[in-house]
Image: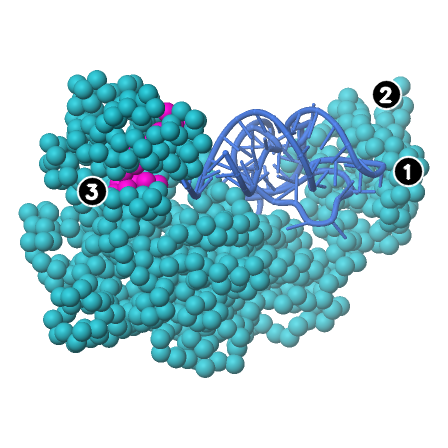
Chain colours: A cyan, B blue
Amino acid sequence: MSQKTLDKTYEPKNVEEKWSAFWLSSGVNTPELPSKKPSFSMVIPPPNITGALHLGHALNSTLQDVLARYKRMKGFNVLWLPGIDHAGIATQNVVERKLAEEGLDRHRVGREEFIKRVWKWKEESGGTIIKQLKRLGASCDWTRLRFTMDDGLSKAVREVFARLYCEGLIYRGDYIINWCPRCDTALSDLEVQFEETGGKLYYMEYPLKEPVAGITSLVVATTRPETMLGDTAVAVNPDDDRYKALIGKAVIRLPLTGRDIPVIGDSAVSMEFGTGAVKITPAHDFNDFEMARRHDLPAIRVMGLNAIMNENAGEFMGLDRFKARKKVVEGLEKLGLLKKVEDYKIMLGACYRCSTVVEPTLSKQWFVKVGPLAGPAIKAVEDNETKFIPKGWENTYFEWMRNIRDWCISRQIWWGHRIPAWHCKDGHVTVAAVDPVKCSTCGSRHIEQDPDVLDTWFSSALWPFSTLGWPNETEELKAFYPTSTLSTSFDIIFFWVARMMMMGKHFMGAAPFSDVYIHALIRDAQGQKMSKSKGNVIDPLVMMEKYGTDAFRFTLAVLAAQGRDIKLAEERIAGYRNFCNKIWNLARFTLMNLEPGYTPGEEPAEESLGMADKWILTRRNACIAETSAAIEEYKFDEAARVLYRFVWHELCDWYVELSKQDLKGENGTDRKVGAAHVLIKAFKDTLKMLHPIMPFMTEELFSYLPLTLGEEGKSLMALPYPAPGRDYTHEAAQMENVMDLIRAVRNIRTDMNVPQDARTDCICFSKDARLREVIKENEKHIKQLAKVRSLTISESGPHPKDSVSAIASGGVEVFVPLAEHIDFDVEAGRLRKELDKLTSEYEGVKKKLENPEFVNKAPAEVVEKEKARMEGIMEKRAKLEKGLDHIRNVRG
RNA sequence: GGGCGGAUAGCUCAGUCGGGAGAGCGCAGCCCUUACAAGGCUGAGGUCACAGGUUCGAUCCCUGUUCCGCCUACCA
């Protein structure tokens, strides 16, 4: 297997499907139960059943997958539980649209038939996003796929509802709620999206029945004139001298209706805004509803749930609310009561599912009393039982939780968990987890189940424990609750995270996760939010197809800096596709340099390791430590960056080049064996470290390598993450010196326009005896990589004739004789530029060291460092000046 | 109205014990060198938004200003 030749470029299509199938069949994604290993568990934020994979899913799933694979390699028993959300309103909308195509609607087919059709639709098209997640490589335990409408989860929903009801934390009542006239259902506050819209502020005059204190009328300002038909009072501030005489005395004859309404005083009314008098429509405005409760005012609904004016609207009955607005304004105008109209910016609330303008409406609904649940959920975060990453989001969480309002959970749709409450003819309510046969109050057997269903988020709130089998006491719950990490987007902190926290604390006694990682939002390259209407959407599936899934995943990981939006441009993905290819070719190189039939042997003796081997082993240790630390801290970008640098700029750029001679056997068998061993080891570990981010290609390449017994036939994620080994600090530093020397020569060659294929001599001076030895030992490398013909190294000497100089690290003076190429002007320019740089550095350090305050107050080590730095600068400066003198001399 | 975050190289961004400014991409020059042109080598480019303050010393800490995002809110 080891001698299989690879294509010159990486072709993702040939390998991805194969490994997806392997992961599924090999069972690596499914945790052991019971297990002696420590647990690591996550629940996936269940995507909508109606959804298709978008960048947000792709990012979040990639990051979770990195965690899952990494933790498996670190020896954890990992459960990553996948699932889908039934998305009540959205799904119902989809199926209703299909019905409409057939010329039907849900009322005509009936509830039972409609639900049947939804399930049928779910079976046919509901699995799309799951397939797409698999395509992305998500290593979820697909054997535990859950759906919020499953029997088990439905049981949990009923249980929770019944218990909360018994505890008095669920109640039913007439309150004002957000109503979507298109979806025909109530919405929670969160399901309304506000947008600034250009509107008008209408000033309308309301005449008094009889003058009071010389006042004959009041002018009120409103953005919604049509609601005036339902006004039941006008409110003014009790401190407002203009109006306070009217409070409780004046009676307004409401225009267009003839009804009489009172003038009330309430300190919530602003004296500065508008006219200081505000109309009160309790049935169609949240504030007005609150005020009406304070003053015991009646509420009059003037439109039906379809947002069409009803019988209380008199002559306007039958008009849609926007038409009614026009007509009311016209009516007032005719009466001379419309005083003025101003342009005005208003925050208009719209249904987040269908964008229809919502109508605040008085209605009988079910609510969760959230206060008692929020307390413990807040405390869990205060006490660090749950941590947000980045921490800043905790403020957002607290802010909302501390100002939370009761949660309207009933929805007037058919698709969802039907509320487990039954009504008898006498209006008694029976709530039970299992279907009752009679009214619990009067014993009547004529009971009917409440027609409403629950908000989809109600079932999502139970997700971390309902998916593990609650209310049964399962092994899964014992092993995996509380879960370790929840990774999600900031925009559902309120919708979902906060509610899971409340339910988890209340029913399980423990917060549902210890870490909440909030990932960034993806925007387009210009920083705009992606949307279909703007046409700037990047389709993850297209990207995977075009550049390979691994390149796409790596891009997402490397851009996932904490606390910042991700601006994604397609070129980035192409760039990391190149990175994939680089790795692929590193594999090619590795395989091409192994003896036929090579089998991994014992760890070679230290003597058979070269300096380059020790250097790359040391760098490997650093890479392991840095990537692990980064992933543990959710710094996916850093992990990816470290790997990129290690693979490309250390392994490929240097180690591969430095190891070539050894691998060819130019330095004897021992070294050949040693180098082959180190190369394989470094490359295998690289694949392991890359695996969580790039699972497909790493599995593929690993399978080509000569494997040891424990590695055969296993997925990389079933193998241990590499552990750092011994650091060769000295050798590594010496190697770096040599590398810098090579860079110095290359630099001279380029600056002097030495042709690529020309070889030059190189003369080095160093006072450091050990360093001279190191350079000598690496003569072959220097010759090969810096294109040097002959290398001489000595303690010091006269400036070699016609040569160009540079100072490499360790203070090594480097001379390259270039009789035929030398251009003294260019050379002088080079040296002077170096000298200028050095001089400004010199000035800075000098200033510091001459400042007694610095020398006295700064820590001794910092002062020492600066002194050492000064010495280095002085030394280098002297050498550069020597070089410049030399040029002056030879030119005369 | 309140809150949060951002302003560092042409672009996108790293830079949490305050002590020599970094990466990727892009750009320029030279190269098809036996893993890779989806490549190699080399290089140019930044008063770290502005103004103060603390400090021996500030990209980093504090205050204010400007600009840009986002979240949230009952001035009709």
- Determine if the magenta segment contains residue A277: yes
A820 vs A104: above or below: above
The picture quadrant where one finds residue A594 is bottom right
The picture quadrant where one finds residue A605 is bottom right
Q: Are marks 3 and 2 in contact (CB under 8 Å)?
A: no
Specify the label residue A266 is tagged with.
none
- Pointer 3 or 2: first along the chain: 3
- Give the spatial CA distance, label 1 vs label 3: 78 Å
In the rendered image, residues at marks 1 and 3 fall on the same chain: yes
Q: Amino acid at mark 3?
A: Arg
Specify the label residue A301 is tagged with.
3
Residue at 78% in and 53% down: A734
Q: Which residue is mark 1?
A: A853
Specify the label residue A891 is tagged with.
2
Position in image of residue A141 (x %, y %): 38, 69
Nearer the observer: mark 1 or 2; the answer is 1
A315 vs A484: above or below: above
Report the magenta residues as a range.
Answer: A273-288
